[in-house]
Amino acid sequence: MLQVMSLTLPRLAVAAGASLAALTSLSAAPAAAAGPSLSAGHHRGDSDHLTVTVRDVNTGADGTFEVRCHPSGGRHPDADGACRALERESRWGQDVFAPVPGDTMCTMQYGGPGTARVTGTWAGRSVDAAFDRSNGCEIARWDRLVPLLPVARA
């Protein structure tokens, strides 16, 4: 992403009347600070605590589970895996728990009656997210967070 930005800096500077030197200094930021992963600058501490309530997944994984990350723990059956899934899917500027946008075209696919609700705090932000498997987009959203959310069967 930094390479693309550096190619367009001269045009941005001219269009915005900004100083090319000022814009260039922004593109010279270390890759670790500008990288896509949240984990590079993620505050590690008591702020990462989630409660996951799962219903009707048809795999015997129904229940309410707590998970803490950094370090991983809690009553979740796979706290380490849940934390790894959250880290893998977290990106700066994006909410890993965000719902599917309303104007998204999704396949008419049914993934079963499973539902989940995740509440708590992740990366210093409050979380209150609902999940289901009602169409292809929702199934993909759920599956991205396995094993925080359990593998589900239709």
Image (cartoon, rainbow, N blue to C red):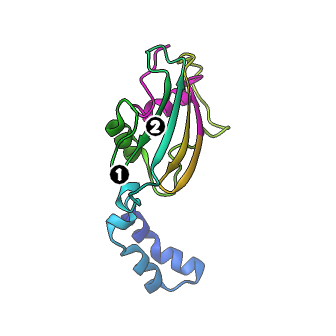
Q: Nearer the viewer, residue 31 or 112?
A: 112
As drawn, the residue found furthest toward the front would be 75
Q: Which mark is residue 89?
A: none
Q: Identify the residue at image location x=67%, y=37%.
A: 102
Q: Identify the residue at image location x=60%, y=20%.
A: 108
Res 25 → quadrant? bottom left
Q: Could you say where residue 23 lies in the image, as x and y percent from the top left?
A: 46, 79
Q: Judge left or right: residue 44 versus residue 65.
A: left
Which amino acid lies under the numbered mark 2 shown in the image of this protein? Glu
- Whether residue 150 is in magenta: the answer is yes
- Whether residue 55 is in magenta: the answer is no
Region of the chain picked out in magenta, as a range: 129-154
Q: Element at badge 2?
A: strand
Q: Could you say where residue 109 lies in the image, as x and y percent from the top left?
A: 56, 18
Q: Would you place residue 153 above or below residue 98 in this image?
A: above
Q: Identify the residue at image location x=37%, y=45%.
A: 88
Disc 1 crowd rating (10 Å Cα; few below 14, some 14-19, many 20+) is some
Which amino acid lies under the numbered mark 1 shown in the image of this protein? His
Q: In which quarter of the image is the N terminus?
A: bottom left
Q: Mark 2 points at which residue?
A: 66
Q: Would you place residue 57 above or below residue 74 in this image?
A: above
Q: Which mark is residue 70?
A: 1
Q: How many numbered discs sit on the rendered protein? A: 2
